[in-house]
Structures are given as structure tokens and as C-alpha cells.
Amino acid sequence: TAAMDTGQRAGPSNPGDKEEDLQGLWQELYQLQAKQKKLKREVEKHKLFEDYLIKVLEKIPEDQLLSYMQMSITNMARQCCPSAYSMPKSMDLFSKLSLIKEFMLDKMETVRLITLLTEPRVCWSWNSLRDQGLRRHPKPFRKYPRSWVSTPRTPFPSPHASECSSLS
């Protein structure tokens, strides 16, 4: 068990296995070094903004900074309400922050749903699958042949323009 605790293998060792393990460790090291470089670049990029914000904050008196933050949160909470009357005047700061968070999450969900509904769909044609063999990644749906793309389209596409009309 002492050999297992130190990471050594018990019994006869195969030099090919050690070489393979070493190769895997080197590859992992290179990947981690690349990730570290990427993270350092990100930190450097954000450092400029951090330095700027620190300089700005140093120039603002503390009591005024708190007042600005409260005013900003209140204004943002008002914008998140359907009308100015729906937000109670006595709402505390954390309730306003919760209101803002819920509004933002709702908007993000709406955008995600709209994106899912408007992104191009992939169509499967049994003939193309049979001709090309089963494909792992089907080609994205193109509404018009390539030759039609350069010509102006009518505002209302014909019912025959979509190959997926039976799917939608």
C-alpha cells in the first residue's frame, strides 16, 4: 500500500505504460499552461478597467458614493416596473435589488426563447440521408437555392419556398 500512496505501481512495470502516462501528463501540462496564459491575458485586460474605477471611486466622497448607488438602484427598479405606480415608495434597497434581478432573469429567458424560435432549423430529407449515408451533423436549412440569394425576394415568400413547411 505504501507504493500505491506514492503514486507508484505495485508489481512489474511496463515501460510502454510509463511512457504513455508521461506523454499524457505532458499534454495536460501544455493545456494547463495555455489556459493559464489565457487567464493572465483576461486579468490584464480587466486590470485597466479596475484601475480606472478605483481612481474614479477615490475622487467621490464615501457618503456621496452610497447616495449615488441608492439613487441608481431606485432608478433601475423603477425602469423594471411596468409603470411608475407599481413600485411602492417604501420598498427597501434589497427588495429593489431582488426586483431588478427578477426582471433581468425574465428578460434573459425571453431573449433565449426568442433566439430558439428564430434561429434556422435543420431539415432532414430521407433522400439526402440515403444518398450521402447517415450524417452525424446535417447541413443547416437553406430557404432558397444559392442562385436565388442574389436576386431580390418578394416580401411574402411562396408556400413552396420552404422545404420544412410540413414540419413547422
Image (spheres, rainbow, N blue to C red):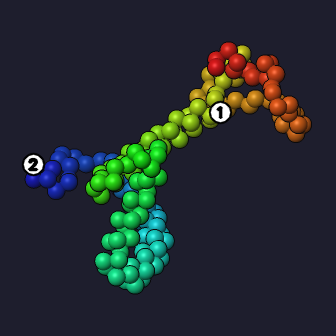
- As rendered, which of 52 and 20 lies closer to the eye? 52
Give the label on residue 1, or none. 2
Closer to us: mark 1 or mark 2? 1
* Few, some or many residues within 10 Å of mark 1 (<14, 14–19, 20+): few
Q: Residue at x 65, y 33 (%)?
A: 120
Q: Residue at x 56, y 36 (%)?
A: 114
* SS category of the residue bearing label 1: loop
Image quarter of residue 159? top right
Report the side of 145 relative to 142 (left or right): right
Q: Counting residues from the N terminus, which is met first, the one under dot 1 or under dot 2? A: 2
Image quarter of residue 40? bottom left
Report the side of 35 relative to 152 (left or right): left
Expressed as whole percent of the image width and height from the top left, the position of residue 164 reads 69, 20
- As rendered, which of 100 and 77 lies closer to the eye? 77
Residue 111 visible, this angle: yes
Number of numbered discs visible in the structure rendering: 2
The answer to whether the residues at label 1 and label 2 have Cβ atoms under 8 Å apart is no
Tell me the amino acid under the disc marked 2. Thr
Quadrant in the picture for the C terminus: top right
* SS category of the residue bearing label 2: loop
Expressed as whole percent of the image width and height from the top left, the position of residue 49 reads 47, 74
Give the label on residue 50, or none. none
* Few, some or many residues within 10 Å of mark 2 (<14, 14–19, 20+): few
Distance between the alpha carbons at the discs numbered 1 and 2: 58 Å
Report the side of 29 relative to 165 (left or right): left
- As rendered, which of 70 and 136 lies closer to the eye? 70
Give the label on residue 120, or none. 1
Toward the bottom, the furthest residue is 59
Q: Is residue 7 above or below residue 151?
A: below
Tell me the amino acid under the disc marked 1. Pro
- As rendered, which of 12 and 101 lies closer to the eye? 101
Q: Residue at x 90, y 37 (%)?
A: 151
